[in-house]
Structure formats: C-alpha cells, structure tokens
C-alpha cells in the first residue's frame, strides 16, 4: 500500500516534469524558429544551410546543458559560502573535486539521477536553526538569472549569428533547469525545490539535513560510519520518516549497521523501512535493496527470495550504478554465491579495484573491501568442505 502511494506521487512528479519540459521546449522551439526566419530574411541562412544550422543547434544545446550544470552547482557553492557553509566537494558528471588535507584532489563518482553535486560543511545550528534556503535554492537562482540575461543579450545582438544563437539556447536551457529544479518534485533523487520544501516543514527535518552534511563531512575526512557518534543515527519516528530529510537518517542507520557487520539487525530494519510509508528517495531505496540482497546471500542464499528482489527495475538500476562500490560488492557476492560464476566474479572484482583508485571516499572502500572479504571467506569454507566430502 505504501509503495503504491509512493508510485502515484512519483508518476505525478514525472508528468509535471514532462509537462514543464514540453512547455519550455515548445516555447524555445518557437523562439528558435522565429529567430531562424529572421536570419534567413537577413541573408544569414541560405536555402542549403538549414541542415548545418540544425547540427550547430544540437551541439549548442548539448554544450549549454553542460554549462548550465556547472552554473547550477556553482550557485550552490556561492550561496552556501555566503551563508556560512564551507567547501567540501564539487562534482560535474563523474568528475569530482574534493578537499582533502587543505588541497583539492580530482576523483570520480557517478550517481544515477544527478548531473552534478556541490557538497558543503554546514555551520553550527543555533537554537535548532540554521540557514538552508539560499544553499538549497542557489543553483535554481543562478540558472534563472543567467538564463534571463542570456536571452536578453542574445536577442539584443542578433547580428552576431553564432553568438546570439548560443545565448538564446543558453537562456532557454537555464530557465528549463530553474523550473525543473525549483518546482518541488520527488524522483530518483529529490530536486532542490523539494529539498527546501521538506526542510521548511519541521525542525526535525532541519536537524536531519545538518546531520547528513556532517556525516558527509566526516566521510570525506576518512571516518567510517561505524566510528561516528551513535546518536547521529537515531531512527526518526514513523511520522518523521515520511519527510525525505528524516528518512535519509534512517538509511544512514542501515548503512552504519552494515558497516558494523550487524547484518541481521540491518536486514530487519531495511525490510521494515522498505515496507512502510516513508520519504526514502528512490536511489536510497534501491541501494537498500542491493544491501538486502547481499545480506541474504551471505546468510541463507535463498534464490527465490533474491530473485524477487532482483527484479527488472532493480537490475536496470544496478546496471546504471555499475561503478558504485556497494553495487559492485553485491554483484560480486551474487556472481560467486548465487551463480558460482568465478569468471564473472573476477571481472567484477577487477572493476572494484579499478574503482577504488579514483573513488573519493577511502573509508567506504575499506568497508566494502571487508564485505568482499566475507564473501571470499565463505567460498573458501565451501571449498574446504568439498575437499573433505
């Protein structure tokens, strides 16, 4: 029942997103068509130049999206610094610049559903409050402001053919980014507008947001979840868990139990959270399923139960997150313990080792390596048992 309600909310968000993108795309198409007609009248486009114009336009759209992602994350950084946050990491696509020992280091991290991310260390809470609006909405503001400026300048300087076309495209993409990120919508990862809305609903959500940022800060410093203060991972009440910010603390609690090797307790909690009505975002929900598959593989290896969890959507998600350490760990366990496919397991292990060299958080790699070692130990035990039978 809870899952059904979440699916309805998710589909509503998807329909709204598609509607907004269609509307802005339609308006952008009208603008570009009118602009192309104007350029043809001025002799800037010949009868044989339409295909070339379309190719240039597609390249400009791709490049504009890339630039607007940078502008969006820079907005979080700028407004975060203005309100007392400190820089932690800045990611565009899979390239991530992270601050370690006072220096910037380039690493790689891919997260499905995100084009980039700017993480910052939060200021201390005072009286249960902290600034959150500008940091969360900073990317939306910069996309919108830059988008409007680009549109204005683009139409103002129509005589500069390539420059004006690019500026108009930048303007349309910027406004599209501002709308799709600003109107609160849930998704694989909740957008900025939804996060700001969630934070404004309760003081517990604000504290959970602060805790998330502090936990991320500690992970960046090389501290494992199991070694962080236990009170940071207190499970919110069922009512509080309906807020996505509070729900993330519930997810972190599961992650901490996995890191501490408390597999039975972790599995029970994950099962409970996945069956109840919570605000857990889709990416965390699917990563929890991934962890549940691992727990069952090392404690029972019930094929029917695992196959039920490893449905089509879960497989698609794990494929999209194929370079993520916890996903690789589970795939390795599945290849060895469920499929007895040593060749496939070897390939996955090599991928994990490759990932570990560029992954930004060594403490996560250390934890995941220990979980892989548990799988190897189980295989060794089975091989020894076979020898003595």
Image (cartoon, helix red, strand yellow):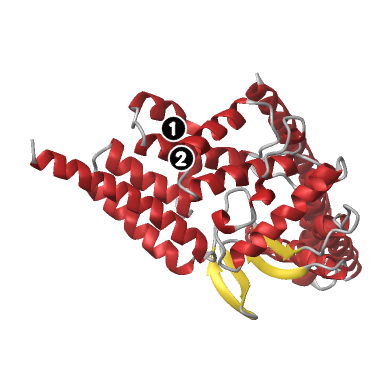
Q: Is residue 282 above or below residue 174?
A: above
**Tally of numbered discs:** 2
Q: CA distance from mark 1 to mark 2?
A: 19 Å
Label 1 or label 2, whichever lies nearer to me, is: 2
Q: Residue at x 33, y 32 (%)?
A: 301
Tell me, yes or no, if residue 92 can be seen here.
Answer: no
Percent position of residue 230, x then y: 64, 51
How many residues crowd mark 2 within 10 Å: few (<14), some (14–19), many (20+)?
A: many
Q: Quadrant of residue 340?
A: top left
Percent position of residue 194, x then y: 79, 43
Q: Residue at x 85, y 56 (%)?
A: 132
Q: Which quarter of the figure is the C terminus placed in?
A: top left
Per the rendering, the mark at residue 263 is 2
How many residues crowd mark 1 within 10 Å: few (<14), some (14–19), many (20+)?
A: some
View extreme (front): residue: 230
* Nearer to me, 277 or 363: 363
Tell me, yes or no, if residue 118 can be seen here.
Answer: yes
Percent position of residue 31, x then y: 83, 52
Q: Is residue 339 above or below residue 163?
A: above
Q: Residue at x 57, y 76 (%)?
A: 105
Q: Is residue 19 above or below residue 168?
A: above
Q: Quadrant of residue 310?
A: top left
Percent position of residue 198, x then y: 81, 42
For label 1, the residue is 310
Tell whether label 2 touches label 1 (CB within 8 Å). no
Per the rendering, the mark at residue 322 is none
Side of 347 where 54 appears, left or right: right
Could you tell me which secondary element the residue under label 1 belongs to? loop
Mark 1 or mark 2: which comes first in sequence?
Answer: 2
Q: Which quarter of the figure is the N terminus placed in?
A: top right
Could you tell me which secondary element the residue under label 2 belongs to? helix
């Amino acid at each position: 029942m809870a899952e059904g309600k979440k699916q309805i909310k998710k589909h509503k968000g998807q329909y709204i997103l598609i509607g907004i993108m269609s509307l802005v795309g339609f308006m952008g198409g009208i603008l570009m068509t009118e602009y192309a007609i104007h350029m043809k009248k001025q002799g800037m486009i010949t009868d044989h130049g339409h295909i070339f114009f379309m190719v240039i336009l597609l390249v400009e759209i791709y490049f504009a999206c890339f630039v607007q992602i940078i502008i969006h994350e820079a907005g979080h950084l700028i407004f975060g610094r203005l309100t007392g946050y400190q820089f932690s990491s800045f990611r565009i696509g899979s390239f991530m610049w992270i601050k370690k020992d006072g220096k910037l280091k380039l690493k790689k991290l891919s997260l499905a559903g995100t084009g980039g991310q700017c993480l910052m260390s939060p200021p201390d809470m005072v009286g249960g409050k902290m600034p959150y609006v500008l940091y969360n909405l900073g990317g939306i503001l910069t996309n919108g402001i830059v988008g409007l400026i680009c549109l204005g300048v683009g139409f103002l300087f129509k005589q500069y053919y390539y420059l004006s076309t690019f500026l108009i495209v930048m303007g349309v993409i910027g406004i599209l980014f501002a709308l799709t990120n600003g109107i609160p919508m849930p998704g694989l990862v909740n957008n900025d507008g939804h996060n700001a809305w969630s934070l404004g609903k309760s003081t517990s959500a604000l504290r959970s947001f602060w805790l998330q940022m502090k936990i991320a800060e500690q992970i960046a410093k090389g501290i494992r979840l199991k070694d962080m203060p236990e009170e940071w991972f207190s499970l919110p009440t069922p009512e509080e868990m309906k807020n996505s910010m509070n729900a993330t603390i519930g997810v972190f609690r599961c992650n901490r139990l996995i890191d501490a090797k408390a597999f039975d307790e972790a599995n029970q909690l994950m099962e409970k959270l996945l069956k109840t009505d919570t605000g857990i975002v889709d990416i965390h929900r699917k990563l929890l399923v991934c962890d549940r598959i691992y727990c069952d593989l090392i404690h029972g290896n019930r094929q029917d139960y695992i196959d039920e969890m490893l449905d089509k959507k879960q497989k698609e998600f794990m494929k999209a997150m194929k370079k993520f350490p916890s996903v690789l760990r589970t795939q390795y366990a599945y290849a060895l313990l469920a499929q007895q496919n040593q060749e496939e397991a070897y390939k996955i292990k090599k991928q994990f080792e490759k990932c570990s060299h560029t992954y930004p958080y060594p403490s996560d790699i250390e934890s995941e390596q220990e979980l892989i070692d548990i799988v190897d130990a189980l295989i060794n035990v089975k091989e020894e048992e076979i020898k003595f039978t």
